[in-house]
Amino acid sequence: MSSAPGEALSYEKPANEWTIMVFFAGDPHLSPSMTSQLKAIKDAGFQANTSVLVHYDPNERGVAVTTFDINNKRKKDLLLTQQKATIIGDGKDPFVRNLLEDAINGATRPNTADQALRTFLDIGAKPEYQAKHYMIFLVGHGVIVGNDMFLPDSNPQSGISLTQLGDTLRHFRASIPEDAVIELVGLHSCAMSAIEVIFELKGVARYMMATEGESFVDSWPYRQLLKKILNTIDYTKSKEAQDSSLTEVDVNCLISSINRLSLHNSTDFMFSGLSADLCLCSLDEANVEALEKPIESLVTALKNAMKPPAGWDLDKDWRGKELIKLAHLEAQSYFQETYTDLYDFCLCLSRRCAHEQPIQEGLKADFDVAIKALKEACNAVVEALKETTPNSVIVHSDHFGPLFQYSHGLSIFFPWARPVQEEPVVLDDNVLTRYEKYEFTKALGKASWLSFLDAYFTGTQRKSREEEDGKKIEAALVSQNGNGNTVGIPANAAIINALKDGPRLGQDSPALKDSARLGTACTCSIKNYPMNFSVSRTVIDDPNPDRPVNETVVDDSNPDRAVKRSGIDDPGTKRPKCVMTPKGTETPLRSRPSVIAKT
């Protein structure tokens, strides 16, 4: 529409049919790579019927959070001159424009990471951005299952839990038009392709794209992805498409293309010695809920196989438990054994169950029944998770590099031992109590995966050193596995408290900390040791039992207070104190030269 001389120029805005939303949650290590991706999105161009919104939080103190409506000004400029508001790619023009012209009034720095995401998504529900189709990409640190610190924000310190992520996306789904569809949720973060996640997000969107293992900021090519999306949408407006009755986007084909582009771009990271995987999942409610029965059967069979028969020597490992532990050890795992590929675990366990087992004759019949049920349950889960199975939640599952070659699409939370956590700030806010609130746990009820984990942690835990040695040593005043229980402290346990409260060495791996990986450090182990505080007898013995009687000593906790030592405690129970001579033989302290003894 033209305007009369002297009047403000006006234009008719084309209908907005697609809204693409990208949420970048940066930190000092990720932000430079995210800035490059922002420029790539800008350089991809624009299409008249598509809006591209980007949230960028660099997580740097004193630096603002910015929301961008990518290339909106350039579209307006073309419309004002009666031109088509579409330019995809830079063509022959090598000039890359800056992002200042795209900044809009959007999200400010919120109180929590969850509020930041919700506020950004609310912008996409505003009338000017409402559309028939949405895509959402969330980029930042992941490892959400159990950890519950997705897209962490250091200012203020917070992260998004799995239940919050589900609630936030459902809130957005309810805010957009009823006939609108979230076609894809791309979780561009480490360890997000998990069965717990698809249960939490079922029905929110049509598809989810994510990785079971590591992901990298530059591994998803946003310029190429956006060009593919824009070109596909723009083609439906062409005369050729209209003549061929192809005026609607083939969404399934488009989503598969996005998955393939991301996979092929990621594959070049092999030249840096890296490995990764990528999975495209269906979030269709019926497809996700179809997994409930196979997993319930698996959990029941696993718990039954863990139980030794009556009369079994409990000092020996029951063969059913051994098979489960061996399959767990063999199966594809992620993030220092925090997660295990569910398909691969069932595959490994099924193969082991197929072998003849060395069980004594009197117990073999019952054992064979339990192992047969376990094998059948494993095979049912494997079949349900195959790409070729009709209505499977796994649409595409791929990998590159050796580290994740046994990935089949969905991981499950499967650490070797009960998670250890510092005493929570909020009562009952720890890994397993949060896991209990997941939709995945609630959907399975008494046959939940959590019920198996509890049996597994208890049944595979090694006896404490004191139990194995048949000796009991006083415990120190420390929490037992994060549950806040404390017991009496021995008289000479200052060193215990120093170790407990002192700085940890190597808590964060430099390789993880300094790279642009989208995960967080983990301290899981394949060892399932008792986590009650255990020390050797020598640690709590008097460090200098040979001090003369009535010697004046200084109380370390109060240097100004001198006390009289009245004697040696339990002198009959002390073993001879020895030191190592240069030749490696022990010499009693009293035989050493007096100048050394005095020290």
Image (cartoon, rainbow, N blue to C red):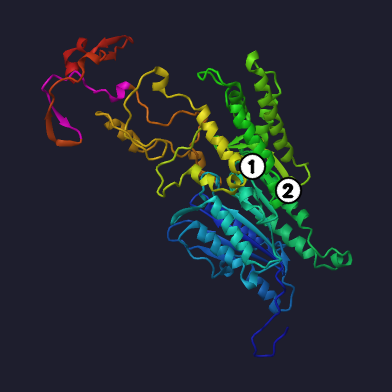
Residue 551: horizontal and vertical position, in percent?
12, 23
* Label 1 close to label 2 by CB (< 8 Å): no
What type of secondary structure mainly makes up the magenta span?
A: loop
Q: Quarter-wise, where is residue 489 in the image?
A: top left
Q: Mark 2: which secondary structure?
A: helix
Q: Which three-letter amino acid code belongs to the residue tagged 2?
A: Arg
Which label lies toward us, 1 or 2?
2
Viewer-proximal residue among 399 and 557: 557
Viewer-proximal residue among 533 and 77: 533
**First reached walking from the N terminus: tag 1 or tag 2:** 2
Q: Is residue 194 visible?
A: no
Q: Quarter-wise, where is residue 361 in the image?
A: top right
Q: Mark 1: which secondary structure?
A: helix
Please give the range of residues in magenta. 537-556
Q: Which three-letter amino acid code belongs to the residue tagged 1?
A: Phe
Tell me if 546 is positioned left or right of 92 in this view.
Answer: left
Residue 532: horizontal and vertical position, in percent?
40, 31
Tell me if 585 is positioned left or right of 382 in this view.
Answer: left
Residue 256: horizontal and vertical position, in percent?
75, 51
Q: How many marks?
A: 2
Residue located farthest toward the bottom when viewing the structure as drawn? 5
Image quadrant in which the C terminus is located: top left
Q: Quarter-wise, where is residue 422 in the image?
A: top left
For disc 2, the marked residue is 260
**Real-space CA distance between mark 1 and mark 2, rounded to the nearest whole angstrom:** 15 Å
Residue drawn at x 70%, y 70% is: 16
Viewer-proximal residue among 570 and 369: 369
Residue 28 forms part of the magenta stretch: no
In this rendering, the answer to whether 412 lies above or below 14 is above
In this rendering, the answer to whether 357 lies above or below 174 is above
For disc 1, the marked residue is 269
Residue 548 forms part of the magenta stretch: yes
